[in-house]
Image: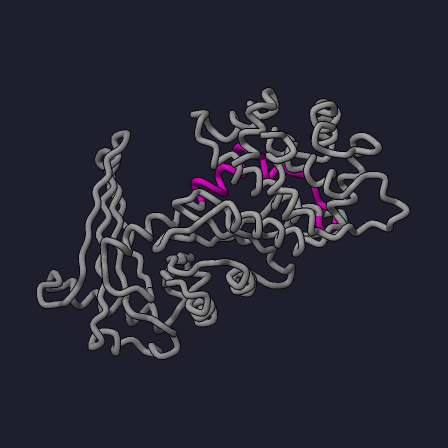
Amino acid sequence: MSEEVEIGGIAKHFGKVKDPRKERTRRHKLLDIILIAICGVICGADSWVDIELFGKSKLNWLKTFLELPNGVPSHDTFGRVFAAINPEEFEKGFMEWVQAINELTQGQVIAIDGKQLRGSRDGENGKNAIYMVSAWAVENQLVLGQHKVDEKSNEITAIPKLLKLLEITGCIVTIDAIGTQTKIAKAILDRDGDYLLAVKENQGHLYEDIHDLFEEDQKYDFEEAPYSYAKTINKDHGRIEIRQCWSISDPAYLTTIRGLGRWRGLKSVVMVISERRIGEKTEQQTCYFITSLESNAEKILKAKRSHWSIENKLHWVLDIAFREDHCRVRKDNAPHNFAILRHMALNLLKQEHTVKAGIKAKRLKCGWDTGYLLKVLAD
């Protein structure tokens, strides 16, 4: 298979992005700029200067499948172009590419959560750090999409916009308490997915009523209540973690919850008690949830535990392997578009399984070995 074919899928989807430059100023093809940037970020580049150096170091190799009529663009050119590219178009190309390489299985968990890009803050020009909401396919280990939170808004408005772009049929969408909104629950159901939403004390009557419902039956050890129950025990490095889950769909119980009719599709309420033991120290936490799933404690507990994959497998990796919070890209649309480049690089590196190493090591190997880079691009 030729190198040109290896990047054909990527070129197809990102080739639709409109060039924001005036025609007379275009010394470099937009697709060349985008593809060099993607390859550079995969290989360890964390800035426009890094990407320029990557391009010049790999010039002969890049010429085998890119036109490069005027060589490799300067870092200033990369910065100006990505600052001007419409991020919605760039996101669309990313999501079309993800859908082409990825097939979600029924019942897969999609975790949605936000992350601030701390390095994008520009205090001198009064610009706050941008905040991105991402959707993470837990089983497939892929970023499905992302959406930037408007500067004068929050995740509550960004999440429905992201959901409209996702294909989530048959999947379980998990969101922390900030996403426990009637509009978000409806948006998930409108996309033929199911929701599992955390409920905290700021939810007022909803939290109070669910808490009281479970507290009453706890007094009698759930002996007479029609609950589904599941328990997991995990031991690792001297630490024991015990999780217990109770869920109930019984209509007689659910009618005790005020405002129930506001929550479209709500079928079950859930309580999870997590206990962590380290030596003589024991910590316990109780959490409550609402879900459009029928009562099935084992399935719900698994989905709840899966949610934290977005923190451990996405946000943590972006900070450690890609140094996202240290990235000083700040101008106009550039931090948003660079975040998409990182997500794309992470997706490609996650899908390559022949090398048993972390993401940071895989990035280094891609920079050292163009054969391995081609293998990553082909995935």
Image position, residue 200 (x, y; %): 37, 62
Image position, residue 102 (x, y; %): 47, 47
Q: Residue furthest top?
A: 368
Camera-side residue of 89 and 309: 89
Camera-side residue of 101 and 315: 101
Which stretch did the figure color magenta?
Answer: 311-333
Taking the spot 44% from the left edge, 26% from the top edge, the residue there is 354
Determine which quarter of the picture holds residue 246: bottom left
Camera-side residue of 12 and 284: 12
Taking the spot 35% from the left edge, 55% from the top edge, the residue there is 106
For residue 361, side relative to residue 23 (left or right): left
Q: Residue furthest front?
A: 1
Q: Is residue 323 magenta?
A: yes
For residue 140, side relative to residue 160 (left or right): left
Image position, residue 368 (x, y; %): 60, 20
Taking the spot 9% from the left edge, 67% from the top edge, the residue there is 224
Q: Is residue 63 magenta?
A: no
Considering the image in quadrants, where does the N terminus appear? top right
Taking the spot 38% from the left edge, 51% from the top edge, the residue there is 105
Camera-side residue of 314 and 368: 368
Image position, residue 178 (x, y; %): 46, 61
For residue 34, side relative to residue 195 (left or right): right
